Amino acid sequence: MVAYTIRRLLLMVALLFALTAAVFFLFNMLPGDPARLTCGKACSPSVIEANRHRLGYDQPILTQYGQFLGGIFFGRTFSSDSPQPIVCNAPCLGYSYSRHQQVLTMILNAAPVTFWLAVGAFVVWISISILLGIFAALNHGRWPDRLVMGISLVGYSLPSFFIGLLLIFFVILKFNWLPFPAYVSPFVNPVGFLKTMILPWIVLAFLNTAFYMRLTRNQVLETFHEDYVRTARAKGLPERTIVVKHALRAGLTPLVTAAGMDLAALLGGAVITESIFSLPGLGSLAVNSVLQSDLPLITGITLFSSTLIIFANLVVDLLYAFLDPRVTIA
Amino acid sequence: MATTRGAQEALLEVVDLRTHFATADGLVRAVDGVSLRIRPGKTLGVVGESGCGKSITALSIMRLIERPGRIVSGSITFDGQDLLRLPEDEMRNIRGNEISMIFQEPMTSLNPVYTCGDQIAEAVSRHGSLTQREAAARAVEMLEQVGIPDAKRRAGEHPHQLSGGMRQRVMIAMALSTNPQLLIADEPTTALDVTIQAQILELMKALRERNGMAIMLITHDLGVVAEMSDDVSVMYAGKVVESSDAITVYDRPHHPYTKGLLASIPRMGARRERLDVIKGVVPNPLNLPSGCLFKRRCPYAMPICDNAPPLRLVAEGHVSRCWLAPDGGRPELGEAPSAAEAEAAALTLTVANP
Ligand SMILES: Nc1ncnc2c1ncn2[C@@H]1O[C@H](COP(=O)(O)OP(=O)(O)OP(=O)(O)O)[C@@H](O)[C@H]1O
Ligand code: SF4
Ligand SMILES: [Mg+2]
């Protein structure tokens, strides 16, 4: 297991290298002139050319890539020949000239918002899905099952922006039950934090709940007919132990796998939900970076999110082997 | 435990059990009139072709029938109490404790995500007051008892690391870990290799000797029954068609179906092919013939067989569901007993040998 993990980690590093290259070259081939973005309204051909040189955009692309990689490992300095050089310490993901901020700083500022959004929604959707999924499975074919499955079908078909707008309209604008969302850190103002996050959590959890409820129900129903569940019954175990310890636990693996990947994807930014509720998370940051063609920022966010996903993949694989003893990894 | 009861008294008595399945295609009468009697410490062999309702009978006794199945009538008396009237939580105290069951499918009957030791310990702690550690020690002790080498290590292994025979031993260890009075063994060896089969049967014999428990041994192999059983009940299409002590059933079978089964056993020395297989097929449970269910395959079938025969006493402790005279000859016309007589015969399922 240890050897496997080390091998996977090495592989992960190699993958990230390939990824940086792909992301870097791909985005640099996009039309648009990065040097143009540095001066906004004050741009004149001579300013653009000067900036191009200062930022190194006049260098060959391979050199630029080398500088980018070097920045990640050793840090780098932008505009070194100007009066105010910009020092960017390792790991330097670049410098955004449209915002005049280091890319890493911007990501690290946005990440906690996304983190709380994702984790909160995760807790909501996992607990509700598992409870309702088991409830539906235990009442298989009867009306509680049909009701739960019906709701899940509705959940499937409603797009999250629609639910989000609906909630904003009624809960915030019409009935004033909650203030308009304005993100504060839970450590600064826990009540304000909860008031802001509760609706985004609901919206984000909604779609996933529909899916995970179904998954839980189907897994429990499937394992319910397994011979070992009958064995558990024949031991005289109480029904709760049979359902949770034997049926659910044995069918848990696909659930954990899916949940791990979904959580990782959310940690990389929930674009729609963040935009609807104006949460300054990674999703909003990504949207803005694209709208402004902010190349260093796009590259940085893409790398950050991909790293999360690659890492989640590893964690999920390890969990898989841990949850299902039949899976051997070596 | 068994000493408090007279030897002739039944530990388990099933009377006219009916378990039906309401399927989309119609009502399947999987068990439709099964009466059995198991004496304390003795082994009853239950034989019959595939699909005759052996497993459903066993699961009914455990009250483990799932929808769309339902026990519609009959009584199951175990140790003086009617199991069908017990509340579910009291039944749970009997399951795995006083009555244990091992299943036909050793490969899939253990939960893949828990170790063998844990699964045995779970049964032990459910029905006793042992600590976790004591239960775990008991699990290892049980694995030793069922002849698993290196039991301590095996207890920490998951089911997929064990062969089918080993898994069935684990199931037996689990079933016996609570010292049950009755072990229901549903074809415990069918899924195993011949040599392993013999080993498991030997093991069950040894454990029966040691623990003094009664066994309901379900099988479609009359050879296995001959080796293990004190009494035999033969089932056909959801009904018991013949019951007696093992020697009587082998030496003087009455029902034509039992005769057919006996003739189809490949004998030692004879060429290994079935000589006298019963012709025809088991009737479709959704479309049972009227009258005797065996009549389409029966070489003795006669006009009276269009009426369903009751379970009749043909000798002391020997009942058969067939119109043939007790000596196996053609019955005199009009010799058919009345319904009341038939019922009385069915209820006097007394067994001759001590
Ligand atoms: N869940 C179910 N739904 C409908 N019919 C069922 C169900 N379970 C069992 N049956 C029917 O009940 C009858 C008896 O089944 P049972 O499993 O008791 O047979 P068996 O004697 O144990 O056979 P085998 O030797 O193959 O194990 C069969 O005809 C089967 O079709
Ligand atoms: S009742 Fe008739 S058909 Fe049925 S077994 Fe006896 S002789 Fe055969
Ligand atoms: Mg069976």
Image (spheres, rainbow, N blue to C red):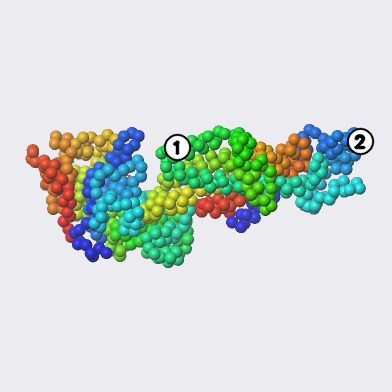
Q: The disc labelled 1 sits on which kind of residue?
A: Arg
Q: Is residue B4 above or below residue B276?
A: below
> Which of the pair B295/A78 is nearer the observer?
A78
Q: The disc labelled 2 sits on which kind of residue?
A: Ser
Describe residue B160's horizontal placement relative to residue B348 as left or right: right
Quarter of image, res B304? top left
Q: Residue at x 64, y 39 (%)?
A: A273
Q: How far apart are marks 2 and 1 (CA)?
A: 69 Å
Helix, strand or loop at disc 1?
Answer: helix
Residue A312, percent from left and from top: 62, 48
Q: Mark 1 lies on which chain?
A: A
Indicate the quadrant containing the C terminus of chain A: top left, top right, bottom left or bottom right. bottom right
Helix, strand or loop at disc 2?
Answer: helix
Q: Which residue is drawn at 82% across and 44% down?
A: A100
Quarter of image, res A64? top right
Q: Is residue B140 above or below residue B264?
A: below
Q: Is residue B281 visible?
A: no
Q: Quadrant of ligand 1?
A: top left
Describe residue B163's horizontal placement relative to residue B282 as left or right: right
Q: Mark 2 points at which residue?
A: A46
Q: Which mark identifies residue A146?
A: 1
